[in-house]
Image (tube, grey):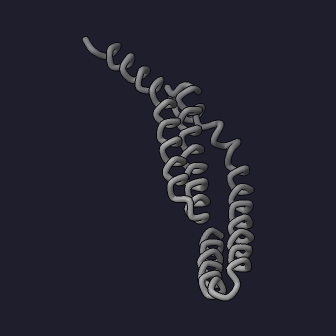
Amino acid sequence: MAIQWIGLCVAAAMLCALIRVERPELATAVSLAVGAAAVALLWTRVREVLPQAGRLSELVDGMDRGTTTTILRVAGITVIAELGGQLCRDAGETALAGRVALIARVAILMLCVPLAGRLVDLLWQLAP
């Protein structure tokens, strides 16, 4: 299914490139409509997987729920930041796209600091 939607997005991009010269407002509308439909379809698929992702910590021996939650949050921030950055670039706001990427990196770093602390604690416990 993903290949079909990717193909549709590429076809819509080519159509937008063709009509942008004559009707830029129509090209923008087509781009937004296809993009929104693709994200909506993707979201329905993600919602199907989320309950299974919550069980991830049960499947991995020795991993506490906080670690699994952090990993899932990092993945979510990555996806949302990529989407936000692309939307900013599509709107011609490359500076804002850069800020979105920076904010995402800092947020991920802040989430990973406690994990790094737990890793150091674990290494200290293993050291003789």
Residue 84 place in picture, x, y as percent: 60, 53
Residue at screen point 49% across, 25% down: 62
Residue at screen point 46% across, 34% down: 109
Taking depth in this image into account, of 39 and 119 the one nearest to the observer is 39
Q: Quadrant of residue 18?
A: bottom right
Q: Quadrant of the C terminus?
A: top left
Residue 29 place in picture, x, y as percent: 74, 73
In this view, the residue farthest toward the top is: 128
Q: Quadrant of residue 85?
A: bottom right
The number of callouts visible is: 0
Q: Quadrant of residue 25?
A: bottom right
Taking depth in this image into account, of 57 and 115 the one nearest to the observer is 115
Taking depth in this image into account, of 12 and 115 the one nearest to the observer is 12
45 in relation to 90, above or below: above
68 in relation to 51, above or below: above
Taking depth in this image into account, of 72 and 104 the one nearest to the observer is 104
Residue at screen point 55% across, 33% down: 70
14 in relation to 107, above or below: below
Residue 26 place in picture, x, y as percent: 73, 79
In this view, the residue farthest toward the left is: 128
Q: Quadrant of the N terminus?
A: bottom right
Residue 65 place in picture, x, y as percent: 59, 27
